[in-house]
Every structure is written in structure tokens, then in C-alpha cells.
Amino acid sequence: MGKPLKIILSILAALALLIIVVISALFIFIDPNDFKPEIQAAVKDKIGRELTLEGDLKLSVFPWLGISTGKMTLSNAKGFQPKPFAEIEESDINVKLLPLLSKEIEVDRIVLKGLTVNLAKNKQGVNNWHDLTDTKPEPPAADSGAQDTQPTDEAQTLLSIGGITIENARVDWDNQKSGKHLEIKDVDLNTDKIVFDKPFSVNLALTVLNAQANLTESIKLTTDLTVNDKLDNFRLADVNLQTTTAGEKVPGKSLTAALTATDVLLNLAKQDLKISTLRVESGALKVAADITGTRIKDQPLFQGPVTVAQFNPVQVMKQLAITPPTMRDVNALTRLAMNFSLQATDDSADLQNLVIKLDDTTIKGSAGVNNFSQPAIAFNLTADAVDIDRYLAPEKETDKKSKPIASPAVTTAAAASLLPVETLRKLNANGELTLHKMKINNLNMQDIHLKLSAKNGIVTTQQNVNQFYQGSYSGNLNMDVRNSQPVLAVNEKINRVQVEPLLKDYKGEARMRGVVNASAQLKAQGNNKDEIKSSLNGQLSFLFKDSVILGFNLQKIIDNSKALIKGAPLPTDNKHDQTLFSEITGTAIVNNGVLSNNDLVAQSSKLRVNGKGNANLNTETLDYKINAMLLKSPDANTGQQAEKMTVAINVGGTFSKPSYTIDPSSLLTEKNKAKIEEKKQKLLDKLDKKLGPGASDLLKRIF
């Protein structure tokens, strides 16, 4: 056995010596730089681009077969700028020789230094790398009748790379079609040893410059990556992505964000994506999600639960250098959290099982957006209790008494008028909102239903309040914003609403009691509140039952006027003055913001009132003439109704401060009617005696 072993060892020694001799000969007799023309010609023939090898090529053979290069450039595509498509300062790649005998490719660390890539897209939308990625279809192979066979595991070549290092790389992106230009610089990439189907660490850092927006974004990524040999199945574990955006227009001039995920699975063959325990944090804002995606290349669909942890919106606004609004409640807008089930495509997003908690309000339902380029919004939401006044600007005590009463539809119209016409014209929305309780402008409402429909420049809202101060309210608003000046139509009705508590809540005081039924049909046009009021046209009607006007005593006004005429002392003031009416009715026509009411009727056991006049909504002034018929009490001796007396009253002033004055002539006429008639007749009789019969008839015709 000793002799054969010696023979084998001698053969191996001879082979080793032969290899050493061959390697030595390669270094002595072969210079890789001599093959530069052949290499450049091969690249030109294969891809049609010019390859320039400026630096020296250095060859290594054993135990690594490799090559190191100096500076190399690859020309740009035809029709683009003359600067190179890519250039590199130096590179180094080595493959181990002996594992090749067993079909194993073991590559040493690949090192690329000073890599620059210039990517571009022209105005026609053609990019400068399309010729490198387009592949020509191969002619079909002749049918040999044999079935295709897949290579066995033993026949497959195994590949491992000792790692990849890219230092100080740069990518320039020039999109002439959109006018966008980005520069990605300081790209550094380092990986561990790369073996298919085994995890290896990845560390990536880069900086993105956007000169147009004056923004700089720094990005750092660390993860453990696993790739299969077909390069269609990827797994990223312990993903950690950190970004910092800086610029003059960035709130606070700098904004940081972090994205982490425990596991990301991407299967390109099946077009599946799964992201587990995704976390996104930026300042106080924290979002958590678990997302799955299907058909991500053809028809992507992403879905999964999303949670936004409770945060302080006011604090976030301050962190973003946004001045928070001044609100009546200092604790308003300090707690916000939400969660929902997300379903999203490349052109839509649908939020189901939506729960929003804003301060003390809980909102539930669903919402969605379809067609991001021209968004169509849909929603169906329910809220338990909302105090909108908490979020409004602080109100002075004097503001309560001076603010005019506005219905929900009119308030909605005024709010909508603050939005640009173009925004309303593009609005495409359809949804419903239900509120169990709501407070706005100090008015309390229960069981509220709101509907919104907006499309093609037509905006329609419907409002119903089933419990509104022991009564109800219903109304709708139609806005046509297809032209430059919006046209509005309002139709409203209130039924059996208690006036006194409504006025106390809204204005802080009530000068009237009773139950009111009213309806209004109004139209207007304009781009702001003043234009809408001045163009207001339509009609309305009202009916007050069992009403009491506080601070106004019609009987006392008449008595004071009588006493003043007689020269008698005025009656003692009474702070609890009031006038009772069993019913007040009327209708009105509105023309260019002026309300004309010609059939005001009020009655009680002692009064009959008829009136007419105007209320100017633009100047908020009153101009009314009221005739009050005072019914005297029955005579105690005869039991018969005494003679009626009519008094004329002028109502002026403003909505918030009306004034009442008596027409003195009406009192004088009633008081002296009999005496005047008696004296007038005596005068006429004297004229007939002195001037002859018929003279009195001539005087009557003159006066």
C-alpha cells in the first residue's frame, strides 16, 4: 500500500508544481491591460454603449481569480446629455478558484468606490436605461418531444459573496418631463457575507437633495436580509429606517421619523407582501400596523389593522412650528387617537371599523377615498357627544347679545362660503353623520342627522334635529358652484320649539317665551357672507303660540303716553314688564336682504295687534308700524264691553336693541274724538246760516 500512496502523492505534487508554474507564467507573460480594446469592443457589440477603461487592470489568479480596475466610464444613451451614464473610480472583485470545481461560486467582497450614475428621462417620457433592460425574445426551441426538466439540487450552482461595499456613491435623477431633479449622494452600503437563503446584515446610508424644494433628507437603514437564488423572494428582519428632513420650509427646520418592522416578507413570484409589527414614529405621533399585500405588481391590494396611539395635537402642531388656534377651552384638542382596518389599492383607501377618540368625543364608522387624482370621498360616521364650542375662538360676553340668530342651514352656507369656489367645485363626496348630542353656539341639540352630497359643482346638505328645545328642526341647503359666483337655496322648518331656553342659551338672555313654528324658503348668491345677505330672496312664515314678550309692556307704554299728555305723574316702573299674546302670526317676503312683513297679527284677551314693516338683514335695523287695539274691561254696572281704542306704535332700532315709540296723534284722536266731532258740526251749521245752504258741503269736500 505504501508504493501506490507514494505514486498518488507524487502526482499531486506534480500537479501543484504545474499550477504554480502556470500562475507564474500568467503573471509574467499576460498583461490584462492588453485586452482593453477587446473588452471595450465586446461591450459596444453587446449593449451599444462606449466603455472607457482609464485606469490599469490588475489580475489575481490564486487562490482568488479576480480583477481590480481603475476609473471606468459607460457612455450615456443616444439623445441624452454627453455626460456618462455611469462611472466608477475603482472596483475590486475576486472569485475563489478551487470551489469552482464543485460548481460553487465563492466571491470575495465586492468593492465599488466613487460610483456615479446619471439617470434621466426626457420630455417624451423615455429614460436613458431602457436599452439596457429591454430584452429581445429568443426564438422558440425546436420541439424534440422531450419534456422540460428542472435541474436537480446537485446540478445547481451555489453562490456566496463575501460582502458588498459601496463607498461614496452618487445618483443624479433628472426628470425633464415633470421638471423634477434629485441628487442622491454620500451613498454607503455594507453587507455581511451573502449566501442564498441565509440572512445577512445590510447597512445603508444616503442623502437626498431636492434643490427645487430646498430640502435635504438623510436616510439610514439597517436590516437582516434573506434572498433566494432566483432573486424573487426576500425577507427583511429587524428593519430600522431612520430619516431626517431639513429645510427652511420644514416645520422647525428639521423633522425626524423612524420606521421599524420585525418582519417583512416579499414574494415577487406570488406578488405577496407581509409586514409584521410595523411602527412609524415622528415626535409624539406613533402609528402601528400589520399589513398584507396581494397582487402587488398587477392590482395591488393592501390591508390590515392600523392604530394611531393617543397624542396631543396641540403639542404636535407646536413641534411642527404650526401656531395652534386659540380656543375657548384650553384642554381642547389635547387628546386624539384612532384605529381602523385599512384596505388600500394604488388608487383608493378604505377605512373600516374606524374609531376616533377626540378629547371626550368618540366617533365610529367608516370612511374612504376613491381615485386619488380626482378624490371621491365617502363616509358614514356616528359620534356620541360633541361640544363644538370648545374649539371655537373665545367669545366675549357682549358678543352673545349682539350676534344675530342664524339657522343651521344658513350657518352651513356661511361656513361653505369661506372655502374657495374651486375647492367646492372639485368636491366629490357622499356621506352621513349622526350625532347623539351636539353643542354649537351654546345651542344644545340631540339626535342629529346630517347628509352631504357633492358632485360636479352641486353641493347638497340635509340636516335633521329630532330633539331641538322640546321641538324639532329640519332643513336642507343646495349650492350650485359651477359658475364663478355660488348660488344657494335654503329650505328650513322648525316645529314646536321653545323660544325662551333657546334664546337664553344662544344670546345669554331671553326677551320672549312661547312655542314657535316657522318655515323659510330662501335663495341667494355670493362669495362671502355680506354678498349672500344682500342678495337674499324668498319667503318665510311664523306662528308663536302662548307667547310672552319680556321687557315690553304694551299696556304700560300706552298708559305712560296718556299720563304724559295729561301732565299726570308717570306710573311706577316695573322691572318685570311683559306682554302676553295667545298667538302671533305672519309671513314675510325677502328681497335683496330686506324682509318685508305686511300681515303681522297678534292677539290676547286685551289686545289685537296688526302691523307691517321691514327688517333689513344687511344693516340689522327695524322699521315697523304697529296698530294696537286695546280692549277695555267690561263696565262693572252694565256688564257691556267699553269702546275700543287703537294706538299706533313705531318700532325702530336694531335687532339687538329695538326701540318703541307711540304716535301721539292716535291717543289725541281717540281721547277727543267726540268733542272734535261736536265742535266740527257746530262750525258747519254756522257756515250754512251765514253763507247759505250748501256752504258746509263745500268745506267738507275741501277737508
Image (cartoon, grey):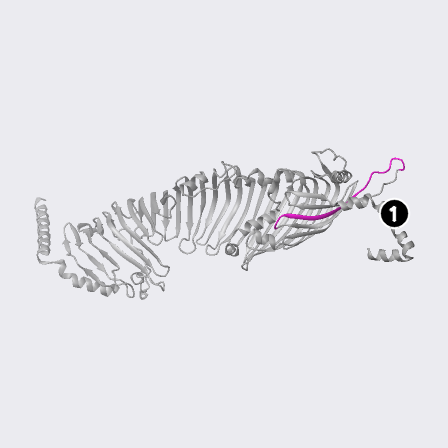
Position of the N terminus by quadrant:
top left
Left/right placement of residue 246 relative to residue 663 reads left
Residue shown at the point (50%, 50%) measured from the top left: 368
Q: Is residue 173 magenta?
A: no
Classify mark 1: residues with Cα within 10 Å, few (<14), some (14-19) or many (20+). few
Position of the C terminus by quadrant:
bottom right
Q: Secondary structure at mark 1?
A: helix
Residue at the limit of the structure toward the front, as seen here:
690
Residue shown at the point (40%, 53%) measured from the top left: 296
Q: Which residues are magenta?
A: 618-638
Q: Which residue is mark 1?
A: 678
Q: Is residue 631 magenta?
A: yes
User: Which of the pair 366/541 is nearer the observer?
Assistant: 541
User: Which of the pair 136/33 is nearer the observer?
Assistant: 33
**Kind of residue at disc 1:** Glu
Q: Position of residue 176 (x, y in %)?
A: 34, 61
User: Which of the pair 556/7 is nearer the observer?
Assistant: 556
Q: Is residue 33 above or below residue 471?
A: below
Q: Position of residue 211 (x, y in %)?
A: 33, 53
Q: Is residue 399 above or below residue 125?
A: above
Q: Is residue 666 visible?
A: yes
